[in-house]
Image: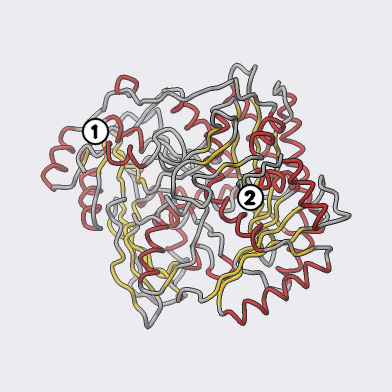
């Protein structure tokens, strides 16, 4: 692995989302297509995307903003190495690298400002060195050496963070070492009696599920980033998965955690399902975002793979009716594995991504008209919204469950809209992140962010935040109205998770990223003013930490700081997240 840059550069993009072979582009005929062979959409023509893209953003396919194609070593600051640390790491046999490509790849997550800078070839402070431990004991050695030589460590899992968590603090004068957990990727054991699995924390979601599936099991934890995000990252950020209604969020799935800190290893003495032994130390580890140590091994609950899976969708006359239905489903505690409600703008966007199924070309608007005239007479195409559903489990129970949910939907004016729309909705989950790169090729920048909110504030927060985004864009000189849209992605007894998406055409703006950040900041202020949380599952990082004190109180901040000061008195884990 020493100098392993070419391997990952062939597979992953260095300045965008996901696999190098997978991307949206407009071909010579002006039709959108999605390249590669990895996804259901791969290799397909998407006839409606051009109309939607140009109409929504006022974009023009003649006006391109291509990225810098290659990473040049001269753009990367030279490494500041702690030679004594390097020599001792060398003696352990643990692989390491200070190649420019390896360092840049681990210097960022996927915030807009991070990717925009990379596309322009602008590289700021990056780690000085990358190390690849292959087991818990390797991590123990690295942390001990970092303490001995006063080196700053930054844990790296899958690199999918959207909170600036992986950005190197520019004021850090010590040598920064990225501790890449990707080689710690094994399932160490499966306990079929207790339905638990003990897993190394560097494993990424798709590999974990694939390996468990081979034995007939699954965790059911499927965040939108599961292709690339790691188990350790889920723990460190308190992640949530699409199917949490059946399987739970990460805090519900974790039975045991092992973490290496500057003060030693922290773990519980037994694998009991619940304990009453003072405050739960797991809750200091979960959400700690790499500030206290490195999660190395996790025991988590597993389930037998579901025998039956069924998608579905429901169209509602408007968003208000849709939210009322989701509220009732939550109240009756009969939510399917996943239930998501898209607003009208997002419905149109999803429709624009329909692949061409035959040689007969229909425009985006023709297809839209056909959709609502043939099936949903009387529904206003500018107000209707769609819920996508996923049911899992025993076939008989799934069919009963499905009837129960559709019966509730009918009381709120909801009409069944078929399995295909549901399945496409979930398939799009994994390709939607690739769309931002396409936008950036044509002067369009965008981002998503999320919150959790009590039920009685869901409609207020959706309306007010979307309106605030539109107002702020106008005030900041954005010349074309932005896309400002939301969806309700998770339901709970006492509230819901809401995702916002916004994007705009930045032609004519001298500093588009600064404008974007001002708008996002205002949107977050609006979320908090409307009773929303700072984050439901993305975490805090450095992007949102200015609001932490208001979020958890002065005393809460003091408690977190006390834990940090005891566990890591010399700030070895100096990523400056949270605090």
- Name the residue located 38 percent from the left edge and 35 percent from the top edge: 107
Q: Nearer the viewer, mark 1 or mark 2?
A: 1
Q: Where is residue 274 in the image (x, y as percent from the top left)?
A: 46, 75
- Of the image marks 1 and 2, the number of the one nearer the N terminus: 1
Position of 277 relative to 100 (above/below)? below
> Disc 1 vs disc 2: Cβ atoms closer than 8 Å?
no
- Reading the image, the residue beneath label 1 is 98
In front of the other: 136 or 356: 356
- Name the residue located 47 percent from the left edge and 44 percent from the top edge: 161
- Reading the image, the residue beneath label 2 is 451
Q: Residues within 10 Å of mark 1 (few under 14, many from 20)?
A: many
Q: Where is residue 543 in the image (x, y as percent from the top left)?
A: 53, 38
- In the picture, measured across the screen, residue 325 lies left or right of residue 134, that is right
- Name the residue located 53 percent from the left edge and 37 percent from the top edge: 24
Disc 1 versus disc 2: distance between alpha carbons? Answer: 38 Å
- Residue 528 appears in the picture as rendered: no
Q: What is the residue that sits farthest to the right in this orientation?
A: 378
- In the picture, measured across the screen, residue 294 lies left or right of residue 245, that is left
In front of the other: 351 or 336: 351
In front of the other: 427 or 140: 427
**SS at badge 1:** loop
Q: Position of residue 164 (x, y in %)?
A: 48, 38
């Amino acid at each position: 692995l020493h100098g392993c840059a070419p391997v990952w550069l062939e597979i992953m993009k260095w300045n965008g989302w996901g696999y190098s072979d997978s991307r949206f582009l407009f071909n010579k005929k002006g039709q959108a297509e999605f390249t590669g062979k990895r996804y259901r959409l791969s290799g397909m023509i998407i006839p409606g995307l051009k109309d939607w893209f140009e109409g929504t953003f006022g974009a023009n396919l003649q006006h391109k903003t291509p990225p810098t194609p290659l990473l040049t070593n001269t753009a990367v600051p030279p490494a500041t190495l702690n030679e004594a640390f390097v020599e001792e790491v060398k003696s352990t046999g643990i692989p390491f690298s200070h190649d420019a490509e390896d360092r840049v790849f681990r210097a960022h997550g996927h915030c807009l400002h991070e990717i925009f800078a990379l596309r322009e070839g602008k590289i700021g402070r990056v780690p000085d060195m990358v190390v690849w431990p292959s087991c818990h004991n390797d991590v123990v050695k690295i942390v001990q050496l970092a303490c001995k030589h006063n080196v700053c460590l930054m844990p790296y899992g899958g690199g999918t963070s959207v909170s600036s968590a992986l950005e190197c603090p520019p004021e850090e004068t010590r040598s920064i070492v990225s501790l890449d957990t990707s080689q710690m990727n094994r399932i160490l054991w499966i306990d079929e009696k207790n339905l638990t699995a003990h897993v190394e924390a560097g494993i990424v979601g798709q590999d974990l599920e694939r390996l468990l599936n081979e034995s007939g099991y699954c965790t059911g934890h499927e965040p939108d980033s599961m292709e690339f995000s790691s188990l350790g990252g889920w723990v460190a950020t308190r992640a949530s998965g699409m199917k949490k209604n059946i399987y739970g969020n990460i805090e519900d799935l974790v039975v045991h955690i092992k973490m290496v800190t500057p003060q030693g290893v922290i773990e519980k003495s037994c694998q009991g399902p619940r304990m009453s032994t003072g405050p739960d130390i797991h809750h200091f580890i979960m959400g700690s975002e790499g500030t206290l140590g490195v999660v190395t091994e996790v025991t988590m609950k597993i389930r037998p793979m579901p025998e039956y899976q069924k998608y579905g969708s429901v169209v509602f006359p408007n968003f208000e009716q849709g939210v009322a239905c989701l509220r009732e489903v939550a109240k009756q505690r009969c939510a399917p594995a996943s239930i998501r409600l898209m607003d009208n703008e997002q419905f149109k966007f999803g429709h624009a991504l329909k692949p061409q199924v035959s040689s007969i070309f229909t425009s985006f608007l023709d297809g839209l008209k056909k959709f609502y005239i043939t099936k949903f007479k009387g529904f206003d195409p500018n107000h209707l919204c769609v819920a996508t559903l996923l049911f899992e489990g025993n076939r008989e129970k799934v069919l009963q469950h499905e009837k129960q949910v559709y019966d509730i939907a009918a009381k709120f004016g909801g009409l069944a809209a078929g399995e295909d729309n549901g399945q496409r909705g979930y398939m799009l989950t994994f390709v939607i992140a690739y769309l931002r790169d396409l936008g950036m090729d044509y002067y369009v920048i965008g981002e998503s962010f999320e919150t959790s909110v009590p039920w009685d504030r869901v409609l207020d927060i959706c309306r007010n935040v979307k309106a605030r985004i539109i107002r702020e864009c106008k005030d900041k000189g954005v010349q074309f109205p932005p896309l400002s849209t939301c969806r309700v992605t998770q339901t709970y007894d006492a509230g819901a998770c809401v995702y916002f998406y916004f994007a705009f055409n930045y032609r004519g703006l001298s500093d588009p990223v600064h404008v974007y950040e001002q708008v996002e900041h205002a949107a977050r202020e609006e979320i908090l003013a409307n009773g929303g949380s700072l984050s439901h599952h993305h975490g805090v990082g450095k992007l949102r930490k200015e609001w932490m004190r208001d979020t958890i109180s002065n005393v809460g901040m003091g408690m977190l700081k006390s834990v940090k000061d005891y566990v890591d008195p010399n700030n070895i884990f100096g990523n400056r997240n949270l605090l």
